[in-house]
Amino acid sequence: MKLYDFPPAPNPRRVNIFVAEKGIEIERVMVDFPAGEHRSDAYQLKNPACDVPMLETDEGIYISQIRGVTRYLEEVYPDIPLLGRNPTEKGLVEMWEHMAFINGILAVAEVFRNTGKGFVDRAVVGPHNYSQSSELAERGAARVANFFEDFNQQLASNEYVAGDGYSMADITTLVTCDFAKWIKTEIPKECEHLRRWYEKVSARPAVVDNP
Amino acid sequence: MKLYDFPPAPNPRRVNIFVAEKGIEIERVMVDFPAGEHRSDAYQLKNPACDVPMLETDEGIYISQIRGVTRYLEEVYPDIPLLGRNPTEKGLVEMWEHMAFINGILAVAEVFRNTGKGFVDRAVVGPHNYSQSSELAERGAARVANFFEDFNQQLASNEYVAGDGYSMADITTLVTCDFAKWIKTEIPKECEHLRRWYEKVSARPAVVDNP
């Protein structure tokens, strides 16, 4: 098995923390993002979405998208479950991971990719070019502010994002909080529950080892 | 178990087809979308995302987001699997369902919600108000065109979206094709593989019963 990786970026970091939490050893193939290797014909043949992370199984099957990679790994290495321990938890983890992705990761990315000078005509990840939109950057900033408040609310009465077990929903929420620093935004002081949770999960060895 | 539903909308339709394919009988609770019931305090207490579909389990747990609802149902009713039959398929179904959602459903919604007169200040589903963006509507239309081409390419060498088994990835792709009609867009004539697949999956009883 091989994991195609680019550790400095937030999305690969989500899988790197997931893999570290499970204690799995996987061979890494570094993809040269700055040089545009993820958009080369050779890479696109393996992954039509032209992104990382991507997994190559021992049978030579390519699985991309974080949902695809983490589901495969959860099935093959079920011992330390991060996608829920029973049907209800599994549903709740998917629910909250989705909300963290849509309202967190995507909202920060709306700001980052629509304002960064390195992303002119590259406002959306993938094989196609799209122009930057200042309207979308502005909306993204408003969405990030709401994300912090909404997840603070959820963590007011839950130890972890999806309930009482640490899961992939925590990993995506944590990576969102750190990714927000790239757009010079931090968890607001008044979001005390989110801040308490952030300190706790940031101290986990799997997170410390994947800064 | 109860499914909070509003059948005319595309996202509830994804779950309604899923449920029909599995042959499950679930009590429905109709949510009065036109009257804004999904944004009432009572509903938001059950589902902070203020959307449908949402599931209420027999234990009184509320699970929202299509990923949450379908994962729970797949675990409780595994007999007719729609999220993959083995680890590799499970990874590929998540991968392709994610791509259909991001590049299909969300792209059509970018056009629909940023142009519709009924969505002024309601450009994003959920509890928060966001203004419409003509830039995003324009980008959405370009993304829908690329979605059709990319999925046509995938279906040129695969019987179904995620490979050789019908799955939730097909349901989301099918609902995207029908949702696109709401923005007066159809599968282009030259996307012959996508059109062939569309005819076939549209004839499935679970789809015919959930128009």
Image (cartoon, coloured by chain):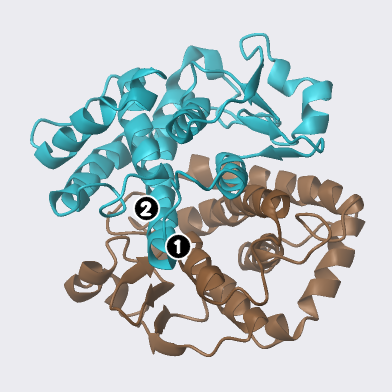
Chain colours: A cyan, B brown
Pointer 1: what residue?
A: B68
- Mark 2 burial class by Cα count in 10 Å: few <14, some 14-19, many 20+: many
Work out whether A206 lies above or below B34: above
Question: At 58% from the left edge and 80% from the top edge, which residue is drawn?
Answer: B19
Residue placed furthest toward the front: A79
Q: Which of the pair A38/B177 is nearer the observer?
A: A38
**Mark 1 neighbour class, 10 Å CA radius: few under 14, some 14 to 19, many 20 or more:** many
Give the residue type at disc 1: Gly
* Residue under pointer 2: A96
- In depth, the one of A145 and A94 nearer the eye is A94
Marks 1/2 same chain: no
Q: Secondary structure at mark 2?
A: helix
**Percent coordinates x, y for residue A87 in the rendering:** 44, 66
Q: How many marks?
A: 2
Decide if residue A160 is on the left or right side of residue B126. Answer: left
Query: For the C terminus of chain A, which image quadrant?
Result: top left
Q: Could you tell me if the residues under marks 1 and 2 are in contact, i.e. CB atoms within 8 Å?
A: yes
Give the CA distance from mark 1 to mark 2: 8 Å
Three-letter code, disc 2: Trp
Question: Relative to residue B143, is residue B62 depicted above or below?
Answer: below
Image location (x, y in percent) of residue B113: 47, 58
Would you say residue B122 is visible in this rendering? yes
- Which mark identifies residue A62? none
Mark 1 belongs to chain: B
The answer to whether one can see residue B123 in this image is no
Q: Is residue A189 above or below residue B143?
A: above
Quadrant location, the N terminus of chain A: top right
Q: Is residue A103 above or below residue B184?
A: above
Query: Depth check: B18 or B139 in front?
Result: B18
Q: Position of residue B156 (x, y in %)?
A: 91, 51
Q: Chain of mark 2?
A: A
Residue B10, quarter of picture: bottom right
